[in-house]
Every structure is written in C-alpha cells, then in structure tokens.
C-alpha cells in the first residue's frame, strides 16, 4: 500500500542503484526518490527523500499491492515484484554501466568506464493484468527547477537547469503541474522499456532509445557487475552473503574516474530526528582510508585498494608539517567543501536543515596521520612503485604526526565543541609514527634534518649506501612514538573506571578505543585492553546490543543520536582480538541484523525504534562488517 511521501519513508526501504559515477535510491513502491547527476555530489534531480516536492520518478500499481524485491545476482540491478488482486508485474531498475568489452579489440574495459549516463526501467506483466500509475517529476537543483516538457520522437525532453533529460517512454503522457503522468493497463506477456539520458546545456540532447537499445544496456549492466564480482574470491568466513554485498557496496560507492569512495551517496539524513544533526556525506574522508583499504584487501579487492590509496595520497598531497592536514576531500580531489543550508527543503521527516558541503573540512583532526600511514602500511605489500611525490608526502605526514601530536583537536567524531586531547587522536599519531619507523625503507626517506651522523661518518669523504639506512633517518620519529605511548599510558588510562578514557581530561568513554588492539598499541590479552572493552560494552551499549559512539551529552549538539553500526562491529572485532570468540560472534550478528532485506546498512540505528538513521548506505558500516568478519575468521584459525 502506498505511503505518504511527506511522512518520510523508512530509510531502510530504499535500494541503491549505481553506475560508479552517481547513485539513485529506489523505494519498495517503485519510486526513485534520490538521484544526483552527473556525480555523487551533484545537485539532486529527484529529491523527494528530503522534501515531498523535490522530485521523483515513480512506476507502481494503481491500487492496493504488495511488493518484494532483490538484486539480480551479485549486481545492482534491482527486481521489484508487484502483486495485486488482478496480477503480477516485475519492475527492473538499473543505472547503465556501459560495455565491459571493447567491441573492436575485444579488450576488457574497466567497470563503468563508458557508462552512458542512463537510468533503465523495464516493466513486465508476468501474470493476469496490472493497472500502472506512472509519474515522471524531475526537479533539478534540489527541487528549485520545474522543467519544461517537450514531446520528441520516442519520448519527451525535460529542459530546465544545467542538465537536460530525455525520457524514453512507450506510452502517451499527460503534462500537468510539472509532471508527466500516465495510467495504463499491462497484460500478461507485455513489456515496456523506459529510460532517461542526460546531457549538459552545451551538448545536443540525446535521442530516445529503442526497446532493443534498452535491453542491450540492461544486459551490459548485468554482465558488468556480475563479471566484476566473479573476478573476486568468495568469502570463506561468517555471513558470506553480507560480506559479499558489502564489498559490492564499496564498489558501488566508488567514483570511477578517480577511484574515490564516498562515505555515503546522500546528504542530511539525520542522526537524530529533528535535532539538526544532518550532514553531507558525499565526500571522501581520510579517516576511512585505512579501514577501507584493510577491508578491500582482505576481501580480495587488491587493485581497488591500491586505486583508493592512490586517490587519497594525490588528493591530500601537501608538505607543511606544521599545519594540520585536511581531513576530507571531494570525489575529484577538491579541497574547498564549504557548507551551506538549503532553506527551501523540509528535510527527512521535517529534520532541518538540509546541508550541502561539510564544514568539517576546516577542522583539525590529528587521527588522519595514522589513518594515512596505516593505509599505506596495508597496501605496501601490493605496490610495485611509490612515486617521489607520494614518498615525500608520506614523509611529511610522519613529520606532522611527530610535530603536532601534543595539540588538542576535534577528534574522530568531528566534535563541534572546544578541542580536547582526545585519546584516539594521540593513538593514531602513534600509529603514524610506528608505521613510518617500521617501513621507512618503502618511503625511501630522503636526507634531511632528521639524519644523525656519528663522528666516523662525518670524517668520511664518501658515504657508503649503508650510511643512509633508514635507522639513521628516523630517530626523531621513534622518539616521538615513544613519547606518545608514554602520554597515552599516563594520561588516558583511568583507574577509576578501569578503562582508557575518551580524552586525557575527564572519564567519559569513546567507542573508537575498541581499536586499541587492532592497531597494535597493546596486545589483546593485556588486562587494560580487556577491561576497556568490557567497560565500553557495559556503558555504551543499548538495549539492542548496539554501541553508541560516545556518552550522551558531550558533543555540544541538540538531541541524542542513535547507536553507531560501525562501533558495534568494532566491539565484535575487539572481542575476537581479546580471545572471546562467542562474544565476538554475538556482537557481529547483532550489528549485521541492522542490514535491510537487500544487505544495505545505514550509519546509525534509533535506540528506541530500531529504525535506520543517518546517511545511507553508509560505507563505514559495510567496512566495519568486513573487518569484523576477518577478525572473527582469523581468530578461529
């Protein structure tokens, strides 16, 4: 039965479509309610997800119906089955990937390297007859533009805003109120093909596609996704179907031209309804880098891990050890990500403001140094070459960690209150220095002030290659690493609560410290680690077994956010690393239960209702699932 779009459909009701340039969200009732073209971070063309008047494209039965859905194989081609009192209809939805093979040469192409910027929708009646309501209501620029429709051969042209759309449509349409609508009856065996293609104002508008062209594009998309999946190994650990889907989600969130992976394809889905905790996640965070690369490499996606690492190092490249490193970037490598509010949009379930851009790009967050060098550490065994620019940049990252670790910052969770000496930030500076010391030969550290020469070397007229061994280039890093460790053990350990605290001041907790054993700061059998894991599980766990990021009331924002899916996977990982496999599996399954029927996960879960909250689907949650599954499998031997 239809749901009032103004009420805000449950986030988990949506399916993801992707062509590795942009994404669409399709409801179980056959409505595309979120779609940005031509990039993940472009203005929405359909935005009903965030405002009932911001555009959609709906194909659904006219009256009462039931729906079931599933992806076809290991793809992002969605089949929705509508069942009514009179018949059954199947709706196939996809964003076209383009060919997988070069027709003239037979050479295999990179997935979606020739995506045609087309949305495909194929409707077929398989039993009886079904009355269908069709509504095409694009609203470019986040709902600001109501385009003008013009009939063209095989469909209509929508003009208005920076992008024009051609809708391939085999049924006559009525134009009214900025919508193109139709009602028609489909009988058993009848099939209709719909498609949209887009072009910029400077380009000629595309022509409508023939039925054969739509079928061919759909087949290319099925083959493209399935071929990519088949080229990667099957998972031999817990919940293989969810791990497989999570790997696919990461690939669906990848921006093909650069290799960037967006945190999520949406903006402003709230962490708490009506509390203003609404952020734009259509960007790339360095914070995610080491977790992402670890997950991709563990899942057999080595080439994809290298591609993401190369994007991160190129986008972030700078050499200013005294200045904070920017924590996030646009999918094209952009640095300027200014935040603003869209006052004309009502927000999901009235959760204003709707934001585009993200002011967190201006925040200092010291943990990024560790995440970058840990990402390098994860991918180094697979690299055949590290160019001079990347080496110099990574050297600068280590220098920055050594220089800045003692400063306060905003922490991993981008607190918008005063800076503090967050334990996790210090921990990741330790990780940066530890990885730099251990793998200095890969960075190929240059001669510079950090070098220490003995008297015998200074007396030499010629220096032998061994005189430039990394051990002589990095004493400053090693000494700083030791100082960071001493500071954490002295100031972060809180005997009064029996745990490492969120910051050097206070005794509040932070779920990020579940990663202490995972990064190698202390072994899993250290009593302080076991106690920290247990205290976090006791004090940050909700009634559903899910973990909060931190204790309520300390982030300076209104309302209380939901439980954080990624942190619950961290708990499972920590249990595995502390030698408690039964608890690890229990926490893992509690977190995995947050996935919807398609295996997609949001950022958070409402502690009261169990409903999804936050941007969706969330790469961080899927990364957490993969890495926890790896820890559990490895702990089992």
Image (tube, grey):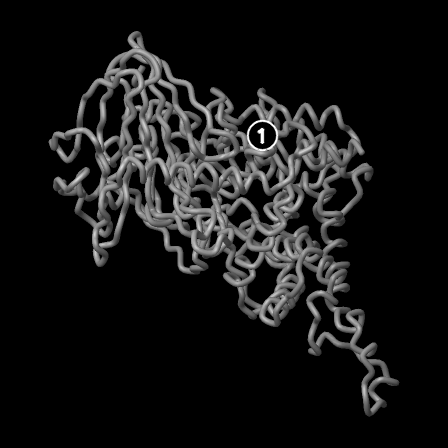
Residue 551 in view of the camera: no
Quadrant in the picture for residue 46 = top left
Tag 1's secondary structure? Answer: helix
Quadrant containing the N terminus in the rendered view: top left
**Residue ranking furthest to the top:** 85
Residue located at (17% from left, 33% from top):
179
Residue 636 in view of the camera: yes
Question: x and y percent of residue 371 in the render?
Answer: 62, 53
Q: Is residue 506 above or below residue 430?
A: above
Question: x and y percent of residue 474 in the render?
Answer: 75, 69
Residue located at (30% from left, 43% from top):
44
Quadrant containing the C terminus in the rendered view: top right
Residue on which the image places disc 1: 242
Q: Is residue 477 above or below residue 182?
A: below
Quadrant in the picture for residue 506 = top right
Question: x and y percent of residue 558 in the render?
Answer: 42, 35
**Residue ranking furthest to the bottom:** 461
């Amino acid at each position: 039965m239809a749901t009032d779009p103004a009420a805000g459909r449950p986030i988990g009701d949506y399916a993801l479509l992707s062509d590795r340039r942009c994404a669409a969200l399709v409801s179980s009732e056959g409505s595309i309610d979120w779609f940005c073209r031509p990039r993940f971070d472009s203005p929405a063309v359909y935005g009903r997800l965030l405002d009932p008047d911001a555009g959609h494209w709906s194909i659904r039965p006219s009256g009462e119906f039931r729906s079931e859905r599933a992806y076809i194989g290991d793809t992002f081609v969605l089949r929705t089955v509508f069942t009514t009192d009179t018949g059954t209809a199947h709706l196939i939805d996809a964003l076209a990937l383009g060919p997988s093979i070069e027709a003239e040469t037979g050479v295999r192409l990179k997935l979606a390297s020739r995506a045609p910027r087309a949305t495909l929708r194929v409707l077929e009646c398989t039993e009886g007859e079904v009355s269908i309501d069709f509504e095409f209501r694009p609203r470019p620029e986040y709902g600001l533009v109501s385009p003008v429709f013009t009939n063209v051969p095989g469909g209509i042209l929508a003009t208005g805003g920076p992008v024009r759309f051609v809708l391939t449509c085999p049924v006559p349409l009525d134009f009214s109120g900025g919508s193109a609508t139709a009602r028609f009856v489909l009988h058993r065996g009848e099939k209709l093909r719909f498609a949209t293609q887009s072009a910029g104002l400077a380009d000629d508008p595309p022509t409508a596609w023939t039925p054969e062209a739509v079928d061919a594009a759909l087949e290319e998309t099925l083959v493209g996704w399935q071929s990519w999946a088949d080229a990667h190994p099957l998972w031999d650990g817990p919940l293989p179907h969810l791990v497989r889907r999570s790997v696919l989600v990461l690939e669906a969130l990848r921006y093909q031209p650069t290799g960037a992976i967006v945190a999520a394809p949406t903006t402003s889905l709230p962490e708490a309804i009506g509390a203003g905790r609404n952020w734009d996640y259509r960007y790339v965070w360095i914070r995610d880098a080491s977790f992402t690369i670890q997950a991709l490499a563990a899942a057999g996606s080595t080439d994809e891990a290298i591609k993401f690492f190369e994007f991160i190092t190129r986008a972030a490249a700078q050499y200013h050890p005294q200045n904070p490193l920017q924590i996030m970037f646009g999918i094209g490598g952009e640095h300027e990500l200014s935040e603003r509010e869209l006052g004309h949009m009502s927000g999901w379930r009235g959760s204003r403001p709707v934001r585009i851009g993200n002011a967190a790009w201006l925040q200092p967050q010291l943990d990024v140094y560790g995440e970058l060098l840990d990402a390098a550490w994860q991918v180094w065994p697979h690299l055949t070459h590290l160019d001079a620019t990347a080496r110099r940049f990574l050297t600068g990252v280590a220098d920055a960690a050594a220089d800045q670790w003692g400063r306060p910052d905003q922490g991993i969770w981008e607190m918008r209150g005063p800076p503090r000496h967050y334990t996790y930030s210090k921990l990741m500076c330790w990780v940066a220095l530890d990885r730099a010391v251990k793998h200095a030969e890969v960075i190929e550290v240059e001669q510079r002030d950090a070098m220490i020469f003995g008297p015998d070397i200074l007396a030499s007229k010629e220096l032998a290659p061994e005189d430039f061994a990394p051990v002589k280039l990095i004493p400053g890093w090693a000494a700083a690493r030791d100082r960071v460790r001493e500071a954490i053990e002295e100031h972060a350990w809180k005997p009064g609560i029996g745990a490492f605290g969120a910051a050097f001041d206070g005794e509040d907790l932070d779920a990020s410290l579940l990663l202490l054993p995972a990064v190698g700061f202390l072994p899993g059998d250290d009593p302080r680690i076991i106690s920290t894991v247990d205290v976090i599980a006791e004090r940050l766990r909700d009634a559903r077994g899910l973990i909060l990021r931190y204790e309520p009331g300390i982030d300076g924002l209104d309302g209380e956010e939901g439980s954080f899916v990624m942190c619950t996977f961290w708990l499972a990982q920590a249990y595995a690393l502390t030698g408690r496999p039964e608890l690890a599996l229990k926490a893992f399954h509690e977190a995995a239960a947050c996935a919807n029927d398609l295996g997609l996960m949001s950022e958070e879960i409402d502690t009261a209702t169990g409903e999804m909250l936050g941007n969706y689907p969330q790469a961080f949650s899927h990364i957490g699932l993969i890495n926890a599954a790896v820890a559990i499998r490895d702990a089992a031997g």
